[in-house]
Image (cartoon, helix red, strand yellow):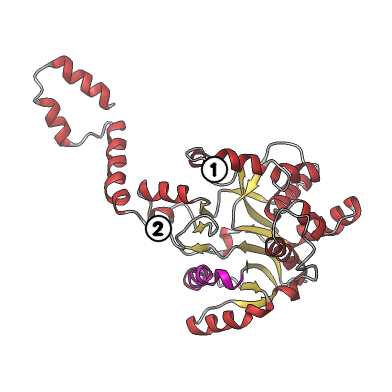
Amino acid sequence: MDKYDLVIFCKTFIRDIDCFLIQAQSVKEFNVDNIPYYISVPSEDIGEFEKLKEKYALTYQILADEDISELLTENDYKDSAHNVSYINQQLVKFEFSRMNIAKHYIVMDGDCYFIRNFYISDFLLDSNTPYMPLTEGIKGDRILFQLFSHSKRSHRAANSNGGGGSSKVFIGRKGKYYTIEMPFVITSSYVLDFVNNFLKNEKNMTLKDTLMKYPCEMQLYVDYVLYKRFNYQACNAFFMPNHMETMYQICRWLGYDTDLIAQNYLGILMNKGYVKSLKFKPNFIGKYIIRNIIRFHHKISKQRVPIHVKLLLGIIPDKNLRIKIRNYLR
């Protein structure tokens, strides 16, 4: 029997220790319901994370990757398009389900951090129903993705070997293409059903074999949950995703800051592989100038025109010109 209904689980390692510290401090600050917090690191990194925990009085429990999964390897991935550490971290995220620690667990990468109070009810509708942050199409805001050159490449990757398109075909799910945002909730029994029934009995494959061929644990998980029609409640992303540097800069220039983001999200994802900053830093011009321009335009569109604009219209002698300006402002 699982020890907890819900825990937080982060797979990290020494190279991500700086961004992980931001996450760990945010969990300490905002974890109102004291959801147990577990992390997994390679055995050789445990000492450094123990020191970090003691130095900052952090709340996580440390597990060794090798104690979670017996499938880890250093040299079996010659034919995979991804490196060993990438495959191993996905194995660990799935294999945590076998530890009998949690019925459900919030999977977090080291580059995610909370920005406001969070509760068990943010992640579970009830003890048997996890929330699942589904997105139709590619990950992240689809409008923002269209604004920079990575969009076509990202869309192709999502539907090529190793991406969501191939895992959808592999599992046999029909319907629209969906993906899921990090962090997300994994239900242990769903993973065990995937490994023991679907992979072992139907496909005659191991979890390691599967991840070498379809190296995206998030996509495999969401496609299998949808295919089996397991119990879940769809929701929006828990965290605001910044998958690319361009997305991050666009949001900064639009005037976003942490307070504004916290109105709709529990936290922020700063994709360490593509975004330079470890934390979201507002842009002064965006926050104090561009945001006010956007607000001003909103007032005009709602016909809440400031008094100085009305006065300006009042002193224009040409009636037809005044009408044209009013129509334009609408």
Kind of residue sitting beneath label 2:
Thr
Left or right, 225 with reference to 49: right
Q: Which residue is mark 1?
A: 150
Residue at 68 percent across and 54 percent down: it is 218
Query: What is the span of residues highlighted in magenta in the rendered image?
Result: 13-28
Q: Earlier in the sequence, mark 2 or mark 1?
A: 1
For this rendering, which residue is in front, 257 or 84?
A: 84
Residue at 47 percent across and 47 percent down: it is 247
Left or right, 147 with reference to 165: left
- Res 298 quadrant in image: top left
Give the Cα separation between the discs numbered 2 and 1.
26 Å
Residue 72 in the image: x percent, y percent? 77, 68
Image mark for residue 258: 2
Left or right, 72 with reference to 278: right
For this rendering, which residue is in front, 268 or 101?
A: 268
Residue 24 colored in magenta in the image: yes
- Res 42 quadrant in image: bottom right
> Where's the N terminus, which quadrant?
bottom right
Magenta: main secondary structure equals helix
Residue 207 in the image: x percent, y percent? 81, 59
Residue 297 in the image: x percent, y percent? 29, 36
For this rendering, which residue is in front, 27 or 275?
A: 275
